[in-house]
Amino acid sequence: MLDPQKQALIKEVERLKPELLEISRFLHANPELAFEEHKAAERLSRTMEKHGFSVERSVAGLPTAFTASRDSAEGPTIAFLAEYDALPGLGHACGHNLIAAGSVGAALALKAALGEVGGRVLVVGCPAEEKGGGKIPLVESGVFRSVDAAMLVHPSNRTEIVKRALGMRDVQVEFFGKASHAAATPHLGRNALDAVILAFTNINALRQQIRPDARVHGIITHGGKAPNIIPDHAAALFYVRALDMAYLEELYQKVLGCFEAAAMATGCRYQVKRAGSDYHPHKINYALAELFRKNLEALGAQVDQGPEDQDLGSTDVGNVSQVVPTVQPMIAICGPSVACHMPEFAVASASRAGEEGMLLAATAMALSGLDLLRDRDALRRVKQEFAGGTRP
Ligand SMILES: [Zn+2]
Ligand SMILES: [Zn+2]
């Protein structure tokens, strides 16, 4: 049986339900791509203002980032992260509409307890999780400096508390050769497309010798203009990923070696460019994860924790987790044959199961926030683990 303060929070989320569903449905019906989430950011900001939060728009120079803060007496700051970008051609196939509504719901519910426990509730509106890493400038601008713990829940096909994330670096490579007639005078040309193809072949050879947690994968973004012209310019974009940044750096240097070898073999010149900043791995905080698990199970949810280092992607939540204790549990909204970034996941993100998952996420996060605000020992354990890097 949950204590009266927790019961009150559960009731509060129930009371907020119509408003949270409206938010989730509005975002789902108006999918916006990374850094273009103007409708979403405005809708969420206005909601927070309506509920008495002080809102700052365009945080860290990002027009679609915001913070919404509400405090009472002295106390810790608990941040709920809202993501709201969609995917090109797929809409909300990553369910970020549910993430945003869940985090807003947790913050609004926890606000109701602030008078009794003291502290600060913060919503950080984080644009561009899918591309560009909006949380990276937010971290760099110091938004999380005063935060004691951060959380968000991602919809998934399995309810899991701890999931690692791979560090990730993008690299664009361009090769420059010499155009010539591909049939009449190929010997006068230098083939930049062959350089790109060799870069892929070299990386494929490298792949067998890399750690199982690491990934290198890419696409050709420019492959020439016409078959009868030796391509004088060709380009590719790669992602290099690993569970730790030291290995990522080592692997990145090897990938550069693959480009260099391709350039030498073809007589081309090459140039690399970085489009974004590194996504960092998720620094797991088991104390915080455990706190969340207990609350989720107290609400009747079944946790189906799989291996924490399998089937991993990358997220800029990792960058947040490096500066403040952070948990990003997954809550199942569909069966195992559907996964995020599939069109079917966009359907699940507007389904009844999706909405129930979102409300469960909001409630479990609010309860976990309450634990951290009123139980200084719990918060101390979380912070000690973060500082020492050791599991309690
Ligand atoms: Zn995604
Ligand atoms: Zn996502």
Image (cartoon, rainbow, N blue to C red):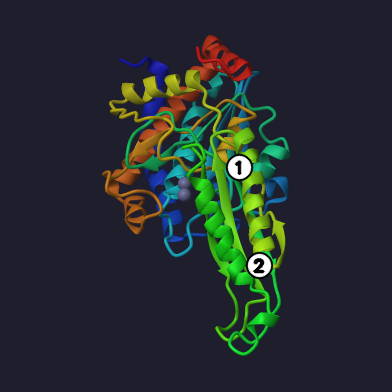
Q: Which numbered marker is on residue 88?
A: none
In front here: 182 or 350? 182
Residue 106, position as x, y percentages in the image: 47, 33
State whether residue 278 is above or below residue 183: above
Q: Is residue 77 left or right of residue 102?
A: right
Q: Which residue is mark 1?
A: 251
Q: Residue furthest top?
A: 377
- Amino acid residing under circle 1: Leu
Which quadrant of the figure contains the N terminus? top left
Within 8 Å of ligand 1, the CB of disc 2?
Answer: no
Q: CA distance from mark 1 to mark 2?
A: 23 Å
In front here: 131 or 228? 228
Q: Residue furthest front?
A: 187
Residue 62, position as x, y percentages in the image: 68, 51
Q: Which residue is mark 2?
A: 266
Residue 265, position as x, y percentages in the image: 65, 63
At a point 73% along the width and 39% down the height, the residue shown is: 141
Q: Is residue 132 left or right of residue 25?
A: right
Residue 344, position as x, y percentages in the image: 32, 56
At a point 48% along the width and 56% down the height, the residue shown is: 86
State whether residue 374 is above or below residue 153: above
Q: Mark yes or no: residue 38 visible.
A: no
Of the residues under marks 1 and 2, which one precedes in the sequence?
1
At a point 54% along the width and 12% down the height, the residue shown is: 381
Q: How many marks?
A: 2
Which quadrant of the view contains residue 197? bottom right
- Amino acid residing under circle 2: Thr
At a point 62% along the width and 80% down the height, the residue shown is: 230
- How packed mark 2 is, by other alpha carbons closer than 10 Å (few <14, some 14-19, many 20 or more), is many
Label 1 element class: helix
